[in-house]
Image (cartoon, rainbow, N blue to C red):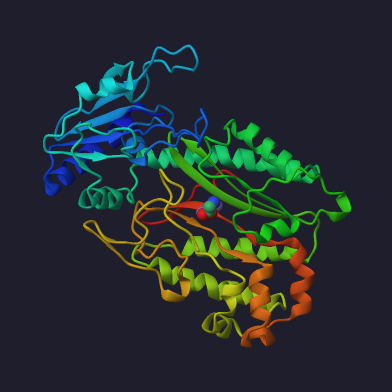
Amino acid sequence: MNKNSYAEHLATLCHRYDAILETCGYESLNVYSGAPGVRFLDDNYYPFRVNPHFKALVPLTNNPHSWVIYRRGQRPQLLFYRPVDFWHYVPPAPQTFWSDHYDIELIADAADAKRFLSDKNAAFIGEATKLDGWKLGEHNPEALISRLHWARAYKTPYEMDCLRQANRIAVKAHHAAEQAFRNGVSEFEINLAYLEAAAQGENQLPYGNIVALNHHGSILHYTHLSTQRLPETELRSFLIDAGADYHGYCADITRSYAYKPDEFADLIAAMDNMEQELVAALKPGLAYPDLHRECHLKTAQILRQFGIIKSSPEGAVESGLSRSFLPHGLGHFLGLQVHDVGGHQTAAEGGTTPPPAEYSFLRTSRTIEVDQVFTIEPGLYFIDSLLESLKNSDLGSEVHWDKVDSLRPYGGVRIEDNVIVHADHVENMTRDCF
Ligand code: GLY
Ligand code: MN
Ligand code: MN
């Protein structure tokens, strides 16, 4: 990673943090990395997930019991936990592209942090588990967190580079996964091929991979990873939604494949084309929910084109018929978290703008602006429970059920890319790597 790009990034963050702290009336910020939780009645730990506000400042994702102390107008301080421990791996003191920008204190004991922390005009951001009695300042003040979340929607050039690199890693692994699918191995084995190619373990990835053969593609968050290999005669389709991490930034990519050239392959091609049209339609000033509506119209056109529904595309959107085939949102902010924060936020100060009532699962109600990063992920599924309700509703007569039944065993299609909105064009980080 380019040292200058990080330096510029940190300068932007300091500028933002100084203004936000001043507005909210704080002099300093105590940001805790967090610590792994202990499993119930056990002496093992849950996988550690760092506080996103910590990794927003310092690109460390796996160093619990650490702190960033940010004082307005000053160089940030990092309390880096480095115990004397012969049971576990202990990371070396940081000496990398970002470390010169911090005053680093190595703490051998988690409680040593107390010597550096102060609650004077301070705010604390983090989970306060096992920090009883610590002097930390006001815990997670909403006014402060809202402003930080709002700012995170506008990515710096360094962040864009991290997101591009996360895409590069994920796309390489998607290629390996497709090859494994074509070799006829199980979902579990396809996932192993993905992890190996990404060189990232499950706990490092931003979310649990969705690796779905055949009808499993209709389960939106299918993370079961069956170990069963299917005979070649039964292999029909493959949907994979899998990401990667780079310095704490996430990729979130979905691809769908047909095993043979058949009608489902044509459906994937139509969805792929439609997804690219939606990406091209992103532009500053457009309300994201309007693009979501456009996505429903295009989905309904495909449903009609493939003889799945009888209604006109406009009628299928109006009646809600298209929602039985596309029950999730068009996409979301992407960054330090896979569903990055602030998608429903009304203003920097806070407030919530809910998505349109008929599209309650849409994670983004904001107007699109330059430097924002989104996923665009239209889908079309054959979901048994939704189809059952549809069949028993007034809209049931608007569906060609024989066609639905022929496509049901394929599960569904989703195509998901990660894009940056620039002033004069949309950058598709994912397609740039495929
Ligand atoms: N992988 C979760 C999502 O696409 O939102
Ligand atoms: Mn996804
Ligand atoms: Mn997504």
User: Which residue is at 76% across, 68% downward?
Assistant: 407
Of 394 and 261, nearer the camera is 394
Question: Residue at the front extreme?
Answer: 41
Q: Is residue 155 left or right of residue 22?
A: right
In the rendered image, residue 269, in percent from the top left (x then y), is placed at: 68, 62
Residue 22's place in the image compared with 71, above or below, is below
Of 326 and 63, nearer the camera is 63
Residue 66's place in the image compared with 353, above or below, is above
In the rendered image, residue 294, in percent from the top left (x then y), is placed at: 50, 72
User: Which residue is at 35% across, 27% downward?
Assistant: 65
Residue 21's place in the image compared with 320, above or below, is above
Query: Which image quadrant for residue 316?
Result: bottom right
In the rendered image, residue 373, in percent from the top left (x then y), is placed at: 41, 52
In the rendered image, residue 80, in percent from the top left (x then y), is placed at: 33, 22
Q: Quarter of the image containing the N terminus?
A: top left
Q: Is residue 63 left or right of residue 39?
A: left
Query: Which image quadrant for residue 346?
Result: bottom left
User: Which residue is at 15% across, 34% downward?
Assistant: 119
Q: Quarter of the image containing the C terminus?
A: top right
Number of labels in the image equals: 0
Residue 430 visible: no
Of 330 and 83, nearer the camera is 83
Residue 261 visible: yes
User: Which residue is at 50% across, 35% downward?
Assistant: 39
